[in-house]
Amino acid sequence: MDSFFLEDWFEGIGEKKYRAAQVLRWLYMHNVSSFEEMTNLGKNMRQKLDSNFFINRLKRVETEKSKDGSVKYLFGLEDGCLIESVLIPEKERFTLCISSQVGCAMGCKFCMTGKSGFKRNLTQGEIVSQVRDTIFDMGESGSRLTNIVFMGMGEPLANYENVKAALTILTDFEYGFKFSNRKITISTSGIVPNLLKLGQDTKVNPAISLNAADEATRSALMPVNDKYSIKDLLQACVEYRMKKGRRITFEYILIQGVNDSIEDARKLVKLLRPLRTKVNLIPFNPHEGSEFARPSAKAVEDFHKIIVKSGLTAIVRHSKGDDISAACGQLGAKNTESQE
Ligand code: SAH
Ligand code: SF4
């Protein structure tokens, strides 16, 4: 729900516009579940709101806790579709990994979500609700949820307008969730025009799922590369209006025998050195029906060493929650529709 819509509504019933901001503050800052709780509004007005709108939460279909403390929420949407969000505890804070679509149309060969196909875009409300309802569920520790990553199901830049609208609510300081732009990351397979738009419209961080160091390998893994090549993508990254001193993150899944050789590592260095980048190396997470395998620990280490020696920052990101299929590329599991 945005402020303009509500402002118009209040004006339409002869009320002041500022009432809209009051309602939104209750919804997002105080995370209330009913109009009854909005105590700075008169009883009449609360009743009017109640007969015109409803506040609902995402239906929690399942909650799974991993050994490492990550929690995977399976949410049921109004139309029966299912999406997943993963809450990841870090030392002092929490990161929430959220979905932007039901399924994904990008068809990356290594990704479980990609294999399940595309159902639909999430609405602005469904994107925001993953955050709102998780904070609600966390109770006291809700304030320690400081970071959001769009790395769940879906390609956020293929649902650009709704993602952008959700970001407005998540980062708004007057009535929204007050997340710092620096602590929100949008991971993308590389839809170049929308990446550039994101740079113009917002201050959040992009993370680029590169996953290969040459055009042929990337095209074989990620069909999007036929439309937006590595060359175009890196050019867009240079153009991306990053705040001074900020670096774009690149994600690189290491897949045995596909993109994990020393030669690949050298090619990657050559590509990324001119950019101020951070590289996340993610050993492939196996999932049912996938033809790929994770490289040995030694191969991962050798690859990592070459990147680091070149002067680039690189970390090996061991996925959290892989015992409950909450790790990257394991989301969106077998079903995107509830069995009801
Ligand atoms: N669509 C966006 C965001 C969701 S995917 C994107 O592609 O960036 C989030 C991350 O999970 C991406 O970096 C993707 O490369 C990674 N990923 C997908 N499948 C994976 C797998 N099987 N193992 C490890 N990482 C995977
Ligand atoms: Fe979609 Fe990202 Fe999976 Fe590719 S890696 S299929 S873009 S979710």
Image: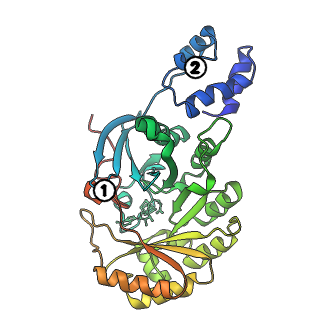
Res 5 → quadrant: top right
Residue 254 pos. (x, y %): 37, 76
Identify the residue at horizontal 69%, vertical 54% (top origin). 201
Please tell me whether mark 1 sits on a helix, a strand or a loop: loop
Residue hosting label 2: 38
Residue in the foreground of this view, choosing between 11 and 27 = 27
- Ligand 1 picture quarter: bottom left
Residue in the foreground of this view, choosing between 285 and 290 = 285
Q: Amino acid at mark 2?
A: Met
283 sits left or right of 160 in the view: left
Q: Is residue 266 above or below residue 219?
A: below
Res 152 → quadrant: bottom left
Residue in the foreground of this view, choosing between 157 and 131 = 131
Please tell me whether mark 2 sits on a helix, a strand or a loop: loop
In this orientation, does residue 85 appear? yes
Residue 32 pos. (x, y %): 51, 26
Residue hosting label 1: 68
Labels 1 and 2: the sequence-earlier one: 2
